[in-house]
Amino acid sequence: MLLPVTILGVLALTMRSVGLLFALIPLLLLFPLFGWLTVEVSDAVVSLRFGIGFIRRTIPLHDIASTALVETSWLQGWGIRFIPGGRLYNVSGNRAIELVLSNGGKVWIGTDDPDGLRAALGEGAAETAVLAGIPAAPSDYTTLGIVITAAVVMIAVWSLVIRSMGSIEVTTSASAVAVHGAGYTATVATSDIVSVHLDNRLPAISWRTNGFAFGGRLRGHFKLSDGRAALLFVTERRPPFITVETRKEPVILNFEEPQRTRALYEQLSTGF
């Protein structure tokens, strides 16, 4: 959980994203619910309890026909998973104890102490079993899975970053002004333009609502500190900035080159 929580937390702060902060909530709730697995064996039952105990299962010992040491695959994941003939309960690693029940069902219990759990269940150590259709997985597969997941996440993040680094495109006509950048588009009819002005400073920004922000480049929908929504296509450290006030929400833009920004302002300000 540390990897996605860290990435989302950093992006939420650097991108001023309320949406990403809300995305953190279910991840943070997973820890007290599934963060650890407690297994207890008494004279009558074996009980499983995830996290603080809202999610649990109890199995009478007289329902257990046999036990075996098994290995899980990283493809099966962690938490509560369906396996052929039963369910897997685990939070980490790839070792588990298989309980074959008297009704033919199976319960796999993930553990970092398989010999201790089997001893508590009254069984000796056994050879590694193989799940029907899925071979036992070496522990290296778990590391490989984490590496692949991290790589996919980082590639997705950096593809967005690279995309945001591109310059914006502005198309003007007698009827509309269109701005494109980092996958976001603002098309404003000239009849909806109230005014156009040039500023050396950006208005204060509260949060990104649906856009992208990295390295001072802001693209998409943002919330200004005065509560207004705005569409931004700007590079913060390259003033001046053109603000196109419309009947709906302002569109604020600039180019990397200040002279291009001023030339566009002269073009847009004609007639407004």
Image: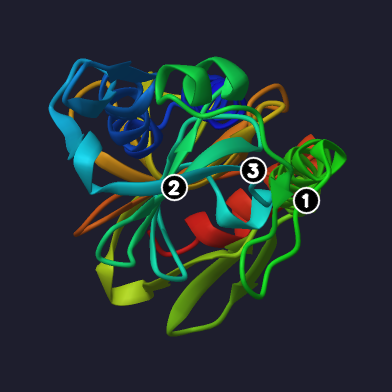
Image height check: is 73 above or below 8?
below
The kind of residue on which mark 1 rests is: Ala
Give the residue displayed 75% in from the left and 54% down from the top: 136
Residue 102: image x %, image y %? 28, 59
Give the SS element for disc 3: loop
Give the Cα distance between marks 2 and 3.
71 Å
Give the SS element for disc 2: strand
> In the image, which disc is placed on residue 137?
1
Q: Check whether the beta carbons of the residues at disc 1 and disc 3 lie within 8 A of each other.
A: no
Of 146 and 253, which appears nearest the observer? 146
- Label 3, residues with CA under 10 Å away: few <14, some 14-19, many ≥20: many
Q: Which residue is mark 2?
A: 66
Choose mark 2 or mark 3, whichever is in front.
Answer: 2
Residue 189: image x %, image y %? 36, 76
The kind of residue on which mark 2 rests is: Ser
Choose mark 1 or mark 3, whichever is in front.
Answer: 1
Image height check: is 95 above or below 171?
above
- Indicate the quadrant containing the C terminus: top left, top right, bottom left or bottom right: bottom left
Of 109 and 126, which appears nearest the observer? 126
Residue 13: image x %, image y %? 49, 19
First in sequence: mark 2 or mark 1?
Answer: 2
Q: In the rendered view, does 167 fall on the left or right side of 202?
A: right
First in sequence: mark 1 or mark 3?
Answer: 1
> In the image, which disc is placed on residue 254?
3
